[in-house]
Image (spheres, grey):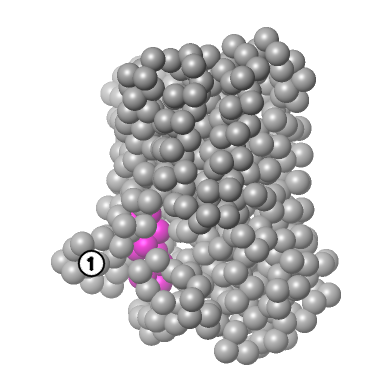
C-alpha cells in the first residue's frame, strides 16, 4: 500500500504547493514526478528520468500544436472583434425576448477556442449594454454568458483542458467531441435555466465602473481589460460567416476523420478517405483553422504575425498550458512505470466499482482545492492514465468518455481560488457574497448536472 500512500501525499503536495505556496503548476508537477519515482522504490533512478522525459515528450508531441493553434485562433477572434460579432449574430437569430439564451449560446461557441476569462471580458460590456437598453436583469445576462463560457471551456476541444487530457490519456479527440457535445448541451441548458430562475432574483448595479478590474488582478494575458474593450468597440468587425469558420471547420474535420475510421468505412478506402484522414488530424485541422483566422482582420499585416502581434500573443498564452500539460504527462508516465495500476487492481475494488464517477470525484476534489480547472484536468488525467486499464476503460470510446467525465468534474465549482470567479464578479459588479451565490452555486449546479449526464451516457456507451 506504500504506492497508494505516496500517491495521496503527492496529491496533497500539489494542492499545498500551488494553492498555499503559490508555486507555478510546472514546478509542482515536475517535482512530484521525480519525487514519486524516487520514493516509490519500484524503479532505478535512471528509469525515473527516462519515464519523466518520455511522458513529457510524448504528451507535448501529441497535443502541443493543437493547443498552440487553438490559442492563436482564440487570439485572432478576440482581437479582431470576431467574438463580439458572434454575439451580435446570436442576438439577431433569437431576438430580444430570448436574449438570455442568446448570451448562453454566445458563451458556448466563443469559449471553444478562446480562454473563458478573456472571452468574458470581451463580451461582458455587451451584456451591460443590452441590460440597460432592454431592462433585462444584468445578473441574468451575466450568468447566462458566464456559464455558457464555462461549459465548453471544460468539455469541448480545442480548448486546452480537454486537449491536454486527451494527450495524457491517449484519447481520440473526435470521439471526445461526439461524447462531449450532448453532455455540454445539458450544461448549457442548465446554466441558462439557472440564469432565468435563480440569477433573476439578484440585482447587480449596471454601471460602467463595474467594468474596471482592480489594478492587482491580472485578467487578460498581454493587455488590460479596459484597452481590450475599447479596441473591440472601435474596430470594424469581421462578418459572422468569417467568425464561425476558424471554430467549426477544424471541429468538422476532426469529426469526419473519426467517422471515416469507423469499421463501417463510411467514406470507403479511396483518396477521399485518405484526404479526410489527413485533414482531420487534430494538428492539421487546427492549423487550417489558424489560416482561416487570418481572414478575420479587416487587413492582415505583418505586425499581426510578428512575435509581439496577435500571433505572438497567442503563442505566449499557449506556452504555459503546453508546459504544464507536458509535466502532467511526465507524472502520468512515472505513475504507470511504478506499477501502481496493479496495486489498484488488486486492492481497490471499491474504487473500480465507482466506474465513470471516479474521474468526476477526483477532478472535482482537485478543482475545489486548486482553483484552476485546467490544472485540475491535467492532474486528474495524469493520476488516471495508469489506472484506466485496471478500471476497464481502455477502449477508445471509454477513454473519450473519461476525458468528458474529467471535464465535468472540473466545473465543480468556481470559487475564490479560481481566477475566473474574480473575472466574473469584478467585470459584472457583483459583491463577493453575490459571487458565491451566483457564480459558485451556478458552476456547481452545472457541473453536477453535466456529471449526471456523463453517468447516464456511460450506461449506454460502456
Viewer-side residue, 361 vs 45: 45
Name the residue at the left extreme: 302
Asked which secondary structure carries label 1, the reply is loop
Identify residue for label 1: 308
Q: Position of residue 79 (x, y in %)?
A: 36, 70
Picture quadrant of residue 80: bottom left
Is residue 364 on the magenta stretch? no
Residue 300: x and y in percent read 22, 67
**In the depicted structure, whether residue 193 falls above or below residue 360:** below
Q: Position of residue 54 (x, y in %)?
A: 34, 25
Tell me the magenta residue range. 71-81
Secondary structure character of the magenta stretch overall: helix
* Relative vertical location of residue 35 with respect to residue 74 in this rendering, above or below: above
Quadrant location, the C terminus: top right
Residue 326 x/y as whole percent = 39, 37
Residue 80, magenta (yes or no): yes
**Side (left or right) of 416 relative to 433:** left
Q: Is residue 202 visible?
A: yes
Amino acid at each position: 500500500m506504500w504506492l497508494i500512500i505516496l500517491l495521496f501525499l503527492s496529491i496533497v503536495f500539489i494542492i499545498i504547493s500551488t494553492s498555499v505556496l503559490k508555486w507555478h503548476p510546472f514546478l509542482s508537477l515536475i517535482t512530484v514526478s521525480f519525487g514519486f519515482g524516487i520514493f516509490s522504490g519500484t524503479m532505478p533512478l535512471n528509469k525515473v528520468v527516462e519515464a519523466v522525459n518520455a511522458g513529457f515528450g510524448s504528451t507535448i508531441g501529441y497535443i502541443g500544436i493543437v493547443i498552440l493553434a487553438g490559442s492563436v485562433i482564440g487570439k485572432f477572434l478576440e482581437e479582431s472583434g470576431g467574438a463580439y460579432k458572434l454575439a451580435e449574430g446570436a442576438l439577431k437569430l433569437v431576438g430580444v425576448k430570448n436574449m438570455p439564451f442568446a448570451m448562453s449560446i454566445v458563451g458556448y461557441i466563443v469559449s471553444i477556442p478562446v480562454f473563458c476569462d478573456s472571452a468574458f471580458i470581451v463580451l461582458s460590456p455587451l451584456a451591460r449594454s443590452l441590460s440597460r437598453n432592454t431592462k433585462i436583469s444584468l445578473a441574468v445576462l451575466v450568468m447566462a454568458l458566464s456559464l455558457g463560457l464555462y461549459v465548453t471551456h471544460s468539455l469541448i476541444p480545442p480548448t486546452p483542458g480537454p486537449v491536454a487530457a486527451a494527450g495524457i490519456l491517449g484519447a481520440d479527440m473526435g470521439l471526445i467531441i461526439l461524447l462531449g457535445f450532448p453532455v455540454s448541451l445539458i450544461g448549457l441548458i442548465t446554466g441558462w435555466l439557472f440564469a432565468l430562475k435563480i440569477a433573476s432574483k439578484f440585482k447587480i448595479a449596471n454601471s460602467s465602473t463595474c467594468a474596471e478590474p482592480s489594478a492587482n488582478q491580472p485578467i487578460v494575458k498581454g493587455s488590460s481589460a479596459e484597452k481590450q474593450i475599447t479596441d473591440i468597440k472601435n474596430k470594424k468587425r469581421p462578418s459572422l460567416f468569417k467568425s464561425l469558420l476558424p471554430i467549426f471547420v477544424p471541429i468538422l474535420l476532426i469529426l469526419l476523420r473519426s467517422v471515416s475510421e469507423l469499421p463501417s468505412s463510411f467514406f470507403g478506402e479511396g483518396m477521399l478517405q485518405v484526404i479526410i484522414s489527413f485533414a482531420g488530424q487534430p494538428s492539421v485541422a487546427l492549423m487550417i483553422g489558424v489560416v482561416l483566422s487570418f481572414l478575420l482582420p479587416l487587413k492582415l499585416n505583418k505586425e499581426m504575425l510578428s512575435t509581439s502581434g496577435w500571433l505572438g500573443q497567442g503563442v505566449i498564452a499557449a506556452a504555459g498550458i503546453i508546459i504544464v500539460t507536458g509535466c502532467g504527462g511526465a507524472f502520468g508516465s512515472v505513475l504507470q512505470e511504478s506499477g501502481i495500476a496493479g496495486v489498484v487492481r488488486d486492492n481497490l475494488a471499491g474504487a473500480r466499482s465507482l466506474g465513470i464517477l471516479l474521474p468526476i470525484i477526483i477532478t472535482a476534489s482537485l478543482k475545489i482545492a486548486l482553483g484552476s480547472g485546467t490544472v485540475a484536468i491535467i492532474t486528474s488525467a495524469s493520476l488516471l492514465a495508469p489506472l484506466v486499464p485496471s478500471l476497464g476503460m481502455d477502449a477508445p470510446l471509454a477513454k473519450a468518455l473519461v476525458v468528458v467525465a474529467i471535464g465535468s468534474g472540473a466545473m465543480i465549482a468556481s470559487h475564490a481560488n479560481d481566477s475566473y470567479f474574480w473575472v466574473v464578479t469584478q467585470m459584472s459588479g457583483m459583491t463577493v457574497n453575490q459571487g458565491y451565490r451566483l457564480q459558485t452555486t451556478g458552476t456547481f449546479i452545472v457541473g453536477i448536472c453535466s456529471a449526471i449526464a456523463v453517468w447516464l451516457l456511460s450506461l449506454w456507451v460502456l
